[in-house]
Structure formats: C-alpha cells, structure tokens
Image (cartoon, rainbow, N blue to C red):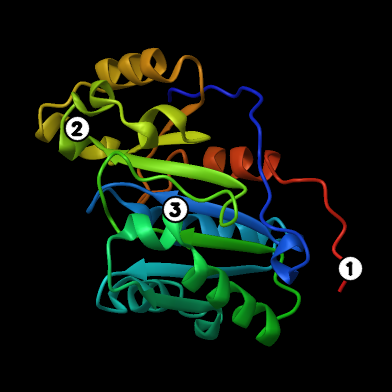
Amino acid sequence: MHQHHHPHTTVSGPTGTALDHVFKIGVGGPVGSGKTALIEALVPILLERGRDVAVITNDIYTQEDAEHVRRTLDGVLDPARVVGVETGSCPHTAVRDDPTMNLAAGAELLERFPDIDTLLYESGGDNLTLTFSPALADVYVFVLDTGEGDKMPRKRGPGITDSDLLVINKIDIAPYVRADLEVMARDADRVRQGRPVILTDSLKGTGVPEVADFVLSGRPACSPAR
C-alpha cells in the first residue's frame, strides 16, 4: 500500500457555535468514486476509537446517499444520526461557496445529540474543482477511483492538489479497467508535492484504517464545553 504522512494545517469554522467543538471531516470527489462507501467503512472504525459520530450527506434532489448510509450502517449507527441535505444546486455551492444549509443541519444534529464530537460531511459528486469551506471541514478528503483511469491525478484541480488527503479508491478493479496503480500513485505524489495519498478498497476495508489514522491525527486541539 502506498501511503505518506506529512504535517498539514487544519482550519476551524466561525467562532461562537456548537460546531466549534466538533471535529468536521469533509469527503468530496467525482460521482461514483466511492465517497459514500468510504464513509460507511470509516464510521465503524471511528466508533471503535471512541468517537461520537454523525453523518451529513449532500444530494441535489434526493436523500439517496443518506438512505444508503442508514441501510449499510443499520445496527452500527443510529439512523437518526444520518441526515441528508437536498442542495437543489451545484454541490460546490452547498459545501464551498455557501455552506449555510450544511451548517444548519450540523447544528440541528447537535441539538438532538449534544455528545457528537465527529461529523462527516459528504459532498454531492462533482468535478475536480470541488473543495470545502473552512467553516465546514477541519480536514478535507478527496476521493478518486481507478475506474476513472490512471490519468486522473495528472488532471490536477484543487480537489486533487490541495485536499488534506487524496484517496485513490477501488484498487481492486484496477486490473480490469487497465489502470496502473503505480502510475496513479506516482503522479499523485508529483502533483500534490508530498501531500498524503492513501490507496483503498473501501468495500473490503483495505487502507481505511490508515485513512482513519490520518483524519484523527488532524483533529484540532479543542476542549468542548457543553
């Protein structure tokens, strides 16, 4: 497995809200890259490590991703801790340009479950320019997959080059789609200039503990006062 860990900077949201005391993880990437599958694999690990978790998904017109997470994590995570936001517009707007809807959804979750200390925000699938507002995510993970082709890291875009962590998912299907993992990893290293890259198979769990290690290592030092 190809993996690097380097120091990175986290940012916090606006002060004076309950969300200040919650560690917020943003997960973005193109449609079908495996964002939902990664979150579904991460949640049990975060719970095992003592985190109090909730999930907010973003779809333009449906609750499909939220419903999928509830079904997959049935018996693992209270379904009420999974909320779907219907953005009605480009996912960039809801997680980068004007995250008001997502911040409101997080605040509502905290009113119902005040012990939440870790919140995962999944963006709706979009292109390589997707990023998260600093108000919404302390750590930002961008997900590519081998099915998109081993050229994807070379396409750059802020999602690939500037995210705190780049995940290259679906390594199990690489041979079947003629994607060269060594090429993807090498190119990702080059365009990210040493920022961390982890290769995963979210359905089997390969690489997911390392993703959990990374995001938890980026947890801001804050003392919740609730």
- Corner quadrant of residue 225: bottom right
**Gap in angstroms between the C-alphas marked 1 and 2:** 46 Å
Please, what secondary structure does the residue beneath circle 3 have? helix
- Corner quadrant of residue 2: top left
Q: Which residue ends up furthest to the front in the rendered image? A: 97
Please, what secondary structure does the residue beneath circle 2 have? helix
Q: Residue 160, labelled with which disc?
A: none
| Earlier sequence position, callout 1 versus callout 2 | 2
Please, what secondary structure does the residue beneath circle 1 have? loop
Identity, as a three-letter code, of the amino acid under mark 3:
Arg
Q: Residue at x 50, y 52 (%)?
A: 26
Identity, as a three-letter code, of the amino acid under mark 2:
Ala
As rendered, which of 142 and 134 lies closer to the eye?
Answer: 134
Q: Position of residue 33 (x, y in %)?
A: 27, 48
Locate the C terminus and report the quarter of the image it occupies: bottom right
Residue named by callout 3: 96
Q: Position of residue 1 (x, y in %)?
A: 43, 25
**Gap in angstroms between the C-alphas marked 2 and 3:** 31 Å
Q: Residue at x 62, y 40 (%)?
A: 213
Q: Is residue 86 left or right of 132 when viewed as pictured? A: left
Which class describes the residues within 10 Å of circle 3: few (<14), some (14-19), or many (20+)? Answer: some
Residue named by callout 2: 174
